[in-house]
Image: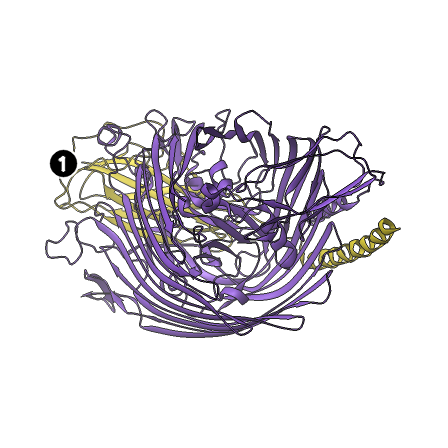
Chain colours: A yellow, B purple
Amino acid sequence: MNTIQTKSKNMKTLKLVFSLLVMSFFVTACSSDNEQIDTEYPVIDISASNTFPVQCSEIIRGQKITFRTKFTDNVQLGSYSLDIHHNFDHHTHSTEVNDCVSDPIKKPVNPLLYINSVTIPAGQKSYEAVQEISIPQDIDPGDYHFLIRLTDKEGWQTIKGLSIKIL
Amino acid sequence: MYKTKLNRFRIFCLLFCFAVVSKTAAQSVRISGKVLSSERGSLEGLTVIIQPGNLTTITDKKGHFYFTNIPKNSKSLTINYTGYLPYEIKLSLKESAVLLPDIFLKPDIKELEEVVVTDHFGFRRKKEESLNIETVNSSFIQRNLGGSLMQSLQRIPGVKTISIGSGGSKPLIRGLSFNQVIVVENGIKHEGQQWGADHGLEIDQYAVNRVEIIKGPSSFMYGSDAIGGAVNIKPVPAPAKNTLGGSIDFTGKSNNEQFGGSINLFGRNEKWFFDTRMTVMDYGDYRVPTDTVHAYNYAVPLYKNRLRNTAGRELDLHASTGYVSEKFKSVLYASNVYSKSGFFANAHGLEPRNVDTELHDKSSRDILMPFQEVTHTKISNTTSFQIGNHQLETQLGFQKNFRREWSHYVNHGFMPPLYPDDMYAPHNLERQYDKEVFSIAIKDEFSINKHQFTVGINGEKQQNTINGWSFLIPAFQQITAGLFAYDKIRISDLWLLHGAVRLDYGKIEMEQYNDWFPSEITENGQTTSQYLKRSDDLNRTFQSFNWSAGVNYNPGKLALKANLGTSFRMPIAKELASNGVNYHYFRFEKGNPNLSAERSYQLDLGMEWQENKWSFQLSPFFNYFPNYIYLNPTSQHDIYYGAGNQVFEYEQSKVMRYGGELQTRYQFMTGLSVEILAEYLYSEQLSGNKKGYTLPFSPPASVLFGMTYSPEIKNLRDTYFSLDYRYTAVQNQIVPPEKKTASSNVFNFALGTKLKTGKQDFIISLQVQNLFNTKYLNHTSFYRLIELPEASRNIILSVKVPFLIHQ
């Protein structure tokens, strides 16, 4: 007798729990939307023959170089930043597989530091970045690091670090 | 997309359908009794065993137990309960119903210190609280000992960690962490630098006696920051009268060659007591099952699988003294927790770095730069007394958290290439945060008829200063105050109602910060040199009203609960005013001075069924934030101080989250039981720039299958062998800059026992974590972003030797 009573009470409470669940289900169902979210990183494509610089590129002081690389994304590109800094202390390495021959470690006197950022025009899935950079005559020659950071509109970022030499 | 969401929810609903249960019919011989202890009265939730046949039952909240169908030839009844001496009584059953005289368990004094409060307490708490609460004690911690307190608690479903290295971690409760989870120690809110993922909680896990984890919003009890949950580390109970004793803990770990331990000494005459402890820990670089990690596409070779420069040290000192009488109790606690630990050397700074591998790999135990040092000092007093029907408690506290991050100077922006000699900060001091906190709280508990009221008021004042050559957040002062009332209404033995309201006020004052170096600024073709202002004088005040309402329904073996409430969190200095590079993640973080206080609405449900041989518990929740504070990765880069790094900005968005935990146990026979612990969480941002995305550090679904065999062996007590298998599902719900994390299968093995030689006890536990040396990634690890696998196989030996000098 006792058992039956508890059972029916339990059934009631189970029903209560279940109805609360159904309620929360509807809350969820309403707020769902069909938008597909973007989880893909943008791509720094250095495969084209006119890409510059590439791993182990050499640059001469006092000249202008033209940075040229293709960027792609599945939805929309965001911006890119370029960063050239010395690697005289060998503090950084590159993201590339092959290594370049580096000079012995030395102290910086007047190293080149170049940082620039460019916002890619809206709506682009593919973009060829072209940028002129003048390399001053009076900077220290040696091993440098050329860092490309590319974001897409959603904030996914891809980094490419290249080892270059300034002669 | 819609379909997958629907499916996800269906699976979620299916979990509930386990709730269909059946009952077994009653039979002839019946035996009943009651279990008590002189200190604690009736003992609930402990196991009574009838031999032969291994029939078991569990005592109810009044300490009663009943066996309804035992064979007439049953010979003995035993109760083995941690913290008490084993109890056995011979049976000779002649009648069909036997009522045994009350059974008084005698406490095992040596262990009292550690286990006065055990399972039965957690069991009762669950039935009396409408929020989801899990309680564990120091034996649980010893059995599951990890590198830090939170890592030792990870077995509890719904509780995960954000770990850094092998010795530090932050609680992650149902996907929320940092300032969204509060940690309370000895009644005082622990105030460190909670906002950072790069260091752990400054808590000594050997000094923890009992931890209560509230998996849900508990702002109405604790104020701002308890929006996601609370980890409440309860004070160690006072020793038994006229005793002098202690314990020695020793722990060794194979993975990071850690050794260390803790020594405890306590004593008490009639009314005065003292309790002291010292914990020392020393560990080397930890090992991972890989020889190369890819830090943001940069391949980093590891030497002998060791994660370069992750060694550390810890030294913790505790002392407390107090006076205890029937109506008055006052305890003074003082502690100092110090740790020094290295950061993985290749992933710190402005970009992944090459390091001097010869220097770093020479020794696996040295701590080179970059490293951090944290000292947390705490002094507090808790006094409780009775006035008539009122149980009052006052709390006064002082805390100082002093954290320094040391790293080689790396100039960026217009910082000079060489570090100036006359700089105010020491050469390699990258960052320093110094926090001083005063807190006060008064609480009154009293009953009127069926109402049990708790009213309280608390206040806290913080002072934060900064130092170092880099800048992330400014110095600030903060004042918070709260007033709350909570009513627990015992309508009948079956029904409990809860209602709470709370008012909060908070004020934060941030100080202006100017760069210590001039930057070149070009305006209208004119280039000038200026000391840039990085953060403004900023004052913000916040008020909040919160409420919570809940119900418990406990018909016998079934326990049901529901709770609905609001919670809030004041934005912190980092969210309002940060403006600098996070050197751990190579990103530029920008605060937003206009953020409003975060608000949350949450529905919590709970169901629990306890039978002799099995138990089942389900705790689903649904949560909505109209203005979740979120660090949004933008598509921009900062070319000045940020050295070209990506800009992350604080924003607010609507967020929906739901999930739950399931725990079930089944006892096949005496000594052999299996359990299944599962958890699931789904979060989605419903507005803002990352609409449709999840939240960062969303733990993937996981299920743990555990098997425990506890044989009765002569001269040994509480022997166990256990095997845990955890399956963690793939995490495809990500938000930049996270990466999808593959599923994993990890096995842990543990065994332990209590050995008695002469009069001396040895409590031994051995664990093999990651038994098969599996290479897997943990989605919520600090180092996940650099694709660092979790630690390789780790053998942990822990021995506890309690002793009694005088009784």
- The answer to whether residue B454 is above or below residue B184 is below
Q: Position of residue B117 (x, y in %)?
A: 53, 49
Residue that protrudes farthest toward the right in the picture: A1
Describe the element under mark 1 as helix, strand or loop.
loop
Q: Nearer the viewer, residue B3 or B109?
A: B109
Q: Position of residue B252 (x, y in %)?
A: 38, 31
Question: In the figure, is residue B207 to the left or right of A31?
Answer: left
Q: Nearer the viewer, residue B447 or B89?
A: B89
Q: How many circles with numbers are drawn on the protein?
A: 1
Q: Is residue A42 visible?
A: no
Q: How crowded is the residue under tag 1: few (<14 C-alpha within 10 Å), some, or many (20+)?
A: few
Q: Position of residue B410 (x, y in %)?
A: 23, 47
Which residue type carries mark 1?
Answer: Lys
Q: Position of residue A73 (x, y in %)?
A: 50, 45
Q: Nearer the viewer, residue A156 or B62?
A: B62
Q: Which residue is pictured at 71% across the width and 55% down the height?
A: B560
Q: Quadrant of residue B723?
A: top right
Q: Is residue B519 visible?
A: yes
Instruction: Check the residue under mark 1 and report the chain it is in.
Output: A
Residue wearing tag 1: A106
Q: Nearer the viewer, residue B326 or A33?
A: B326
Quarter of the image for the C terminus of chain A: give it: top left
Question: In the figure, is residue B696 to the left or right of B666?
Answer: left
- The answer to whether residue B284 is above or below residue B531 is above
